[in-house]
Image (cartoon, rainbow, N blue to C red):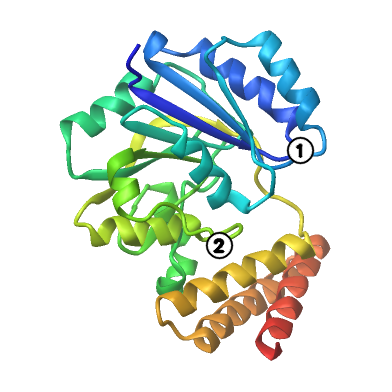
């Protein structure tokens, strides 16, 4: 059976998430046997037990790939895509839930518009479907960013879409050079978006298609935050952007947020913003 769509789900210690994710995919599968699902595990401690449970519960043609190393979002997804056979690919996090049949509609958007190289969707939980690219971040744009997201004023040149659910034309993704594996986590979406745009293709937001994204409003994690700043620094160097200018813009934004949290008596947010300010300062010194 020729596959129309391959879904890549990258897991890392995701036992509490992956089964509901797979359930939602198969429950709302509207393309039958032409759907291919590939689960790539980035060397989780519980990988063997989870894979055994998946094999027992789900269709025999579901592919399970054990990545012997954790080489991040880009590396794990690139591995899954190399094993895919369909012309179209969805990269989907295990904390995403399909809520209704959408696969036919998604495929038709690519089939009806050959300029689309990459596609994102909106989130039923109201988390952000897109963000400003680092080179377009400014205090002015951030102040009005809530307006952009509320009215879905997406600009493919200035913004990048959440990597929790992305769809690609596989050939265009490969032409663009796949995910940059130097980015372990964060800003892979902005980077691949830039490279697809350089091919003359569009990065499209499907405003009428929603999925549910469980994990948002995460608490501050100093290790993840440090990884994010390392990725930001790499991204800025890759595109010959001013490291100091953009990091100082981040510090200014968090200072304003810190002041607002102080005035509004939000101690948790105040501490969050202070953590970011301290980490950004340390990163600049480093």
Q: Quadrant of the N terminus?
A: top left
**Direction from residue 3 to residue 111 in the image, left or right:** left
Residue sitting at x 69%, y 48%:
69
Residue 250 to residue 172: above or below: below
Which numbered disc flags the more N-terminal residue, 1 or 2?
1
Could you tell me residue 117's position as x and y percent? 28, 45
Is residue 204 something that shows in the picture? no
**Direction from residue 85 to residue 250 in the image, left or right:** right
Residue 107's label in the rendered image is none
Where disc 1 sits, the SS reads loop
Question: Splitting the image into 4 quarters, where does residue 109 fall?
Answer: top left
Could you tell me residue 177's position as x and y percent? 37, 56
**Direction from residue 175 to residue 55 in the image, left or right:** right
Residue 261 to residue 101: above or below: below
Question: Splitting the image into 4 quarters, where does residue 121 fall?
Answer: top left
Residue sitting at x 33%, y 39%:
170
Q: Quadrant of the C terminus?
A: bottom right
Residue 104 to residue 13: above or below: above
Residue 237 to residue 199: above or below: below
Where disc 2 sits, the SS reads loop
Is residue 63 something that shows in the picture? yes
Could you tell me residue 247's position as x and y percent? 57, 81
Give the residue furthest to the front.
68
Q: Residues within 10 Å of mark 2 (few under 14, many from 20)?
A: many
Label 2 near label 1: C-beta < 8 Å? Answer: no
Figure disc tally: 2
Q: CA distance from mark 1 to mark 2?
A: 20 Å
Residue 183's label in the rendered image is 2
Q: Residues within 10 Å of mark 1 (few under 14, many from 20)?
A: some
Could you tell me residue 71's position as x and y percent? 63, 53
Q: Which residue is labeled 1 in the image?
A: 13
């Amino acid at each position: 059976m020729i596959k129309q769509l391959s879904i890549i789900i990258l897991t890392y210690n995701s036992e509490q998430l992956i089964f509901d994710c797979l359930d939602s995919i198969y429950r709302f599968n509207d393309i039958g046997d032409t759907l291919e699902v590939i689960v790539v595990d980035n060397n989780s401690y519980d990988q063997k037990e989870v894979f055994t449970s998946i094999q027992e519960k789900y269709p025999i043609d579901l592919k399970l790939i054990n990545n012997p190393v954790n080489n991040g979002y880009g590396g794990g997804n690139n591995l899954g895509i190399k094993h895919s056979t369909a012309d179209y690919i969805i990269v989907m996090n295990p904390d995403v839930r399909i809520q209704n049949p959408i696969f036919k509609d998604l495929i038709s958007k690519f089939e009806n518009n050959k300029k689309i190289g990459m596609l994102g969707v909106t989130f039923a939980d109201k988390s952000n479907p897109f963000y400003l690219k680092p080179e377009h971040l400014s205090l002015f744009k951030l102040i009005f960013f809530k307006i952009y997201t509320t009215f879905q004023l997406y600009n493919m040149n200035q913004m990048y879409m959440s990597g929790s659910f992305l769809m690609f034309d596989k050939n265009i993704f490969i032409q663009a050079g796949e995910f940059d594996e130097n980015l372990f986590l964060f800003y892979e979406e902005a980077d691949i978006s830039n490279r697809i745009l350089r091919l003359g293709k569009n990065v499209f937001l499907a405003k009428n298609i929603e999925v549910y994204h469980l994990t948002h409003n995460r608490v501050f994690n100093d290790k993840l935050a440090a990884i994010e700043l390392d990725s930001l620094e790499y991204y800025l160097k890759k595109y010959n952007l001013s490291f100091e200018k953009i990091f100082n813009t981040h510090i200014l934004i968090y200072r304003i947020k810190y002041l607002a949290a102080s005035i509004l008596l939000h101690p948790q947010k105040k501490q969050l913003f202070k953590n970011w300010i301290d980490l950004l300062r340390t990163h600049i010194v480093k």
